[in-house]
Image: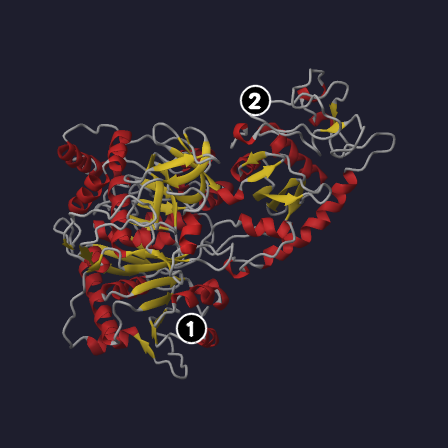
Amino acid sequence: MTSIADRRSTGTQLAAFRAACEQLVGRPLASPTELHDFSVAEPEAFWRLLLEWSGLPWSGSADTVRTGDDVETARFFPDVTLNYAEALLAPLSWVDDDAPALISVHASAPDQRWSRRQLRGAVTGAADALAGLGIGPGDRAAVIGPNDGAVTVAVLGLAAVGATVSTSTPDMGTATLLGRFTQVEPTTLVLDRSAGPAVGAAELAVLLDGLPTVRRVVVLDDGPLPGHPGVPVDRLADLVARAADGRHRDWPRLPFDHPLFVMFSSGTTGPPKAIVHGAGGTLLEHVKEHRLHGDLSSLDRMYFHTTTAWMMWNWQLSALAVGASVVLYDGPVQGPEALWQLVAEHGVTVFGTSPAYLQLCEDAGWCPRDRVDLSALRAVLSTGSVLHEWQFDWVAEAVGPQPLQSISGGTDVIGCFVLGHPEAPVRRGRSQSLSLGLDVAAVDERGDVVVGRTGELVCRNPFPSRPVGFLADPCGSRFHAAYFADHPGVWTHGDLVDVAADGSARVHGRADGVLNVDGVRIGPAEVVSVLRAVPEVADAMPVEQRDPGHPGRTRMVLLVVLAPGAELDAALDRAVRRTLRREASAAHVPSLVIAVPSLPVTHNGKQSYRAARDAVNGDPVPNLDALRDPACVAAIRAAVPAADRPAAARRQPRRGTTSCAPGSPGSGVRCWACAPPSRTTTSPTWAAPPGRPWTCCAGCAPSSVPRWASRSSPASPRSAGWSGSPPRPASPSRTSWS
């Protein structure tokens, strides 16, 4: 592969596209913000030019770019037709058709390679065989398989004939698979068992019994064909061989918003939403992100660590459309070295990973630049959760000068709202830019745009990769409720973000994970990032719980997963509290610290704050099958009362002293650790009421009392009337998001 020093000398693809935009509008668009402003102010010019400039194969007319200005209902390019598989595999004049296009790396078998010509031939054979079964537009296929080449060929073959495809990984289990695929109502079930026997004959029987619409099973691996009464089972290789002597069928070009993929939400708030994405919107958005934001080209080889159940699998697949080659891997990550060795061995130039993997490497002390050859690598992308400032430092020190790009969007849009930019600097903890063509902003509780402060992420204009809709939602009511009910007229994504004036952004996590304790809003990332200083804590999740001792109030419960060999004793409990108090504020100190074996994580790898919150509150957790480890919910539920008993004992008055419990009338003593006062944006410290100094109780060491805790100072207006209850926070409009 080409080294960093040998990259193109003609400038970035973004520079070439900017020049085309400037020629079109007759004015300079020199800065990233100027180009972004043009892309949202003149959407017809931007999207039409992008479609034409991209060189993608399509038919029809691009005169009508979108059918309206309403984010919820606007359709793009209603007179354009295309075929997703054709766009990914068509010969490109600047790409060697015999160079590697797809490399499938297996954990327990030799690697497989396809050139662009070979991949096109394999997909053509698969498409002919599938069309011979009568599969075409209007059919839906459920594909269960690992991240490998056989699944890729099958999916592209299905897309080529116009079928709608939904993919999933075999290790989800039959209940989770049925929770997804019953909504799809597939006519064809495609199965690849090559990575393991997760879906054996018994599991397949359960799936077919639960999917009565399935008319045929197509197996991709070379294992024994399972039998099932009334449902034919064929091997794709056999079907291809039988169709090889026939005439190749043309791949139909279909409407721009023809259903291509059915993706699924995490499912932690109920049954997973079956989100339908159109072929044209998916393709155009991915090409825009790859070429303009990532500068991905035929010089590149991309590997993104993903499974077939996550949208990043679909996202990396579209890299074939720009002439890049793609590496797949179907094995486990058994240590910090696993993925870096893959990157080095296969000359990966763009490596996609997650904050969790980067943290694994840092915690293990594994330094990639000293252990493997990363001379081909030019960029590292990260998504899936919040990427912290120190992880930028670690990549710079342990990997090299390659930019670390934090990209964030979601399954809902099968793309990104914030991502990298080839001309913008990398700033610790931030994404470099907003996605071109998308009017992304942060809004407060009233829906007003805020700049430089944390708010809820919205998109205020129509965009091509907005879903076509949900399955089983004929009137669109569920679709509307999911994205448009909170802030009418704009897409509300459910993430917290702050957007700076220069267009850089930082995503702070899901909005449903924000805690509101005594009127103070606390983002989970604020707590988790501070606890990095406590090596005994491997992972953490702060959640809000109804306070059992004070009806109508809530408190913070901190769930921690301990590092191997660590124990949550009194010393570690104090260390956690002191660290949060010192590095964040007293408002960040939890009422309970609870050690749990694991945290709720969905099959997509995202933490489920909803499941954890329901568990600590003793509420039912909807759709446990959406979690990788449903047993973690019961473990959390059982751990809460066990941890609460000693905490309650600590809140009892010591012999000869008054109570430090919140709200105890006439106590004259207030414990700043067990019942921390509320934080406001107007003061970094909290004044004690006259004559009632802050002090510590039995659970707090005197050395941990902050300097301000015992000082005598006038009461603030909010605390002047204090008589045992905590000072009230500022009004919501003045409460800090961060």
**What x and y, as percent, mark residue 322?**
22, 49
Residue under the point 32% across and 63% down: 165
* Residue 211 tag number: 1
**What x and y, as percent, mark residue 94?**
13, 48
- How many neighbours does mark 2 have within 10 angstroms: few (below 14), some (14-19), or many (20 or more)? few
Q: What's the amino acid at mark 1?
A: Leu
* Residue occupying the far bottom of the picture: 229
**What x and y, as percent, mark residue 255?**
22, 58
Residue under the point 15% across and 67% down: 250
One can see residue 402 in this view: no
* Residue 289: quadrant of the picture: top left
Left or right, 669 with reference to 493? right
Cα–Cα gap, marks 2 and 1: 58 Å
Residue under the point 15% across and 77% down: 245
Disc 2 designates what residue?
682
Examine the rendered structure and indicate whether residue 265 appears above or below residue 521.
Answer: below
* Residue 379: quadrant of the picture: top left
Which element type, helix, strand or loop, lies under badge 2? loop
Residue under the point 44% across and 63% down: 180
* Residue occupying the far right of the picture: 656
Examine the rendered structure and indicate whether residue 617 appears above or below residue 669.
Answer: below
Q: How many marks?
A: 2
One can see residue 46 in this view: yes
